Image: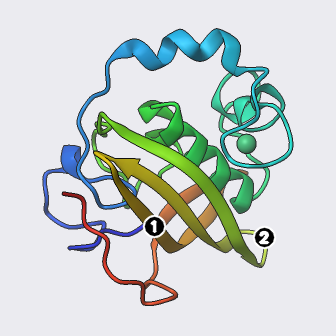
Amino acid sequence: MRSTRKPATSSRAPSRTTASGRTWSPRSGSARLADANADAAPCPCGRPADYAHCCGRWHGGALRLQAPDAESLMRSRYSAFVRSDAAYLLDTWHPSTRPSTLALEPGLRWLGLEVKRHRPDGDARAIVEFVARSKQGGRAHRLHELSRFVREDGRWFYVDALADPAADQPKRTA
Ligand SMILES: [Zn+2]
């Protein structure tokens, strides 16, 4: 995902740079209260599976960080945004572009993910085009991006985002 204002590797304070280029701030622990019931709930990423058998496998347990392909990693990162799992987002961010910290914005509600294209380039590179919808303060946002992924030592990482594939109108948070 790219910054809407500056490159992902910009000099902005890393703690304020996110995968979508928006600014975030910490969410309270309230999201964790739902964890017990979340395992059996449909996975936020939109695949027809419950969370425990979908992105939950990559978020925790023996298979943590083992998403087998770029699309699965991209979906698991979306689910991590939904679940406010900043540690997972950082751990799946390539060291070359990873911010030092990541704070998640309160009040932002993710509504859905649509993966439009998964384009592998050999075994170790891929591009995933997706649309992620969210809502904050009564305003809807639509994020349409081409994200780049690489695989190193058997693990996929998010690197950055290419130019907006559809030249969408820039979406700004209020
Ligand atoms: Zn999933």
Q: Is residue 136 visible?
A: yes
Q: Amino acid at mark 2?
A: Asp
Q: Quadrant of residue 116 in the image? A: bottom right
Which numbered dot is residue 123?
2
Name the colour scheme. rainbow
Quarter of the render that holds ligand 1: top right
Is disc 2 surrounded by few (<14), some (14 to 19) or many (20+) residues within 10 Å?
Answer: few
Q: Is residue 156 visible?
A: no
Discs 2/1, front = 1
Relative vertical location of residue 130 with respect to residue 77 in this rendering, above or below: below
Q: How many marks?
A: 2
Question: Which quadrant is the C terminus positioned in?
Answer: bottom left
Disc 2 beta carbon < 8 A from ligand 1?
Answer: no
Tell me the residue that label 1 is attached to.
Answer: 143
Q: Quadrant of residue 39 in the image? A: top right
Q: Residue at x 68, y 31 (%)?
A: 64
Location of residue 13 in the rendering, given as x and y in whole percent from the top left corner = 13, 51
Q: Residue at x 25, y 66 (%)?
A: 172
Q: Amino acid at mark 1?
A: Leu
Separation (CA) of disc 2 from disc 1: 27 Å
* Helix, strand or loop status at disc 1: strand
